[in-house]
Image: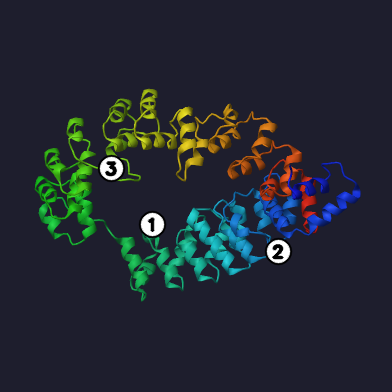
Amino acid sequence: MAHKDDQLTRVAFGVSEATDADRADALRLLEADTALHAEWIAGLAVNSAAPEEVLRRVFTIDPLPDAQYWLAYRKLSPKMAMAAVAHPDPRVREILARNPHLPPNALAVLAEDPDPKVRRVAVGMALEYGVELPTEVTVRLATGPEARLRFFAAAGLPGLPDETLLSLTEDPDPRVRAAAIYSGSWPRLRPEVRAAVEADPDPQVRQAVERATHVEVPLPTTVEDFLAEADERRRRDAALTAPVDSALAALLATHEDSWLRDGAARNPHVPTALALALAADAEPSVRLAVSLRADVTEEQRTAIDYTVPVGRHPVPAWVEERFGDPDALREIAASSHILLRRGVTCAPELPADVIARLAADDDYYVRLMLCENDHAPHELLVEMFADWNGLSWGMLAYRRNFVRPGLARFADDPNHRLRYAALFDPQAEPELVEGLSHDTDGMVRCHAAGDPRLPGPRLIELLGGDGMPRTAAANPALPAELMHQLLDVAGVVR
């Protein structure tokens, strides 16, 4: 039985048999429900099929309902974005400016917004996400009165002409001068400018000069150079990657600092025999590092008492170097070491027999990573989609082998994830979608409510309640005239 609000909405919008008096009464009741209006408005604001005139009406509403919950992250069409940047409330425009999906032309408008907070957020986002604003906009920002915006420009704002960037090394604000000085700009500065910044009274400018002119010294490879190295970071980097000589390798492999022994165990320049001596090290991370070496045989690897900590692990560099070699991939995929098998799943391309082997692997995360890296067969993807509880589970539906036709077979499955998957089937009938709009699981109901195949009468019922008026208002199948009617009922001026 339909909810009372659903019945009211159907009567008000003419879906069921009703007299004009019934419809007028229903509209009066709906007009008083401001909470329902807010849900409609928030849904229409992100409706991908909403015409420009509907969006223009939506973004005149002040306050805009729950903008902080959807405007800062939802992908907006160019039409939606340009309607939103004209909103009268600067707080709404500031929320909009934080949206990483905002089209560049909309971000460019906000970069020159009348409100300083909006401008700073917009330009900061352009810098952070590498959005190239129009050249004339970047020049105005870099030469304008606001030091914060000039700093953003100096720090690498895309689209800024070279000559404008170089001029910022002479900016009145020392933070701006420091940001404009780096290894790429330093050689292009005029001699007199170099001399001025080298003698700059501000320490952060002089530090920027030091960084810009710094020449990297090779890591120590001998015992003498290693003992003379005062920088702890460089000592550890040397242990991990430097082409150390035999004497230094021996020192590192027996050092009291477990960080240095760990580095020696990972360093491919340390002789195999010396590294294998670390297979019995007291530190678990050192033993694990030895077990992952390229020059260790499978027999030697299985003899090491190592433990794989919970969590993600980087792919060993030597495994990555073999990604283009099918025979090497086969050999690594057959390894006893789960981290090596997991690493193989990250190869851009895998032979079919390797995929089959990994898809049947005993390790859950080998199978999961095969799915995440776009290699898994359909059956495994569906299995992981139904079972994996990590944040990325929903993305599995967008892998190339997640075949959508045929998923409607799961419409009655006990697993709610699979009932959700049924809605991805392009051949699913409207009756199936309507049935799932009554599902016991909220995610399934919500997905069905936003499905354009949902029959009209049910869509209008959902506009009136059942916990999903916002999702129903965002459904692209909603007729444009009904969108306007919802705004009319909510009291939004045409």
- In the structure shown, which secondary structural element does the residue marked by tag 3 occupy? loop
According to the image, what is the colour scheme of the structure? rainbow
Q: Is residue 130 above or below residue 203?
A: above
Mark in the foreground, 3 or 2: 3
* Among the two numbered marks 1 and 3 on one chain, the one whose residue lies closer to the N terminus: 1
Q: Which residue occupies the extreme top position in the image?
A: 353
Label 2 close to label 1 by CB (< 8 Å):
no
Residue at the image position 70 percent from the left and 57 percent from the top: 38
Q: Looking at the picture, which amino acid does disc 2 mark?
A: Asp
User: Residue 308: which numbered mark, if any?
Assistant: 3
Q: Residue furthest bottom?
A: 201
Tell me: 212 left or right of 25: left
Distance from label 3 to label 2 (Cα)?
Answer: 55 Å
Residue 312 visible here:
yes
Frontmost residue, 274 versus 160: 274
Which numbered disc, 2 or 1, marks the residue closer to the eye?
2
**Residue that label 1 marks:** 184
Look at label 1 and name its amino acid.
Answer: Gly
Q: Secondary structure at mark 1?
A: loop
Q: Earlier in the sequence, mark 2 or mark 1?
A: 2
Percent position of residue 99, x then y: 56, 55
Q: Amino acid at mark 3?
A: Val
Above or below, 42 relative to 392: below
Q: Alpha carbon of mark 1 to alpha carbon of mark 3: how far?
A: 42 Å
Look at the numbered disc 2 and give the secondary structure of its residue: loop
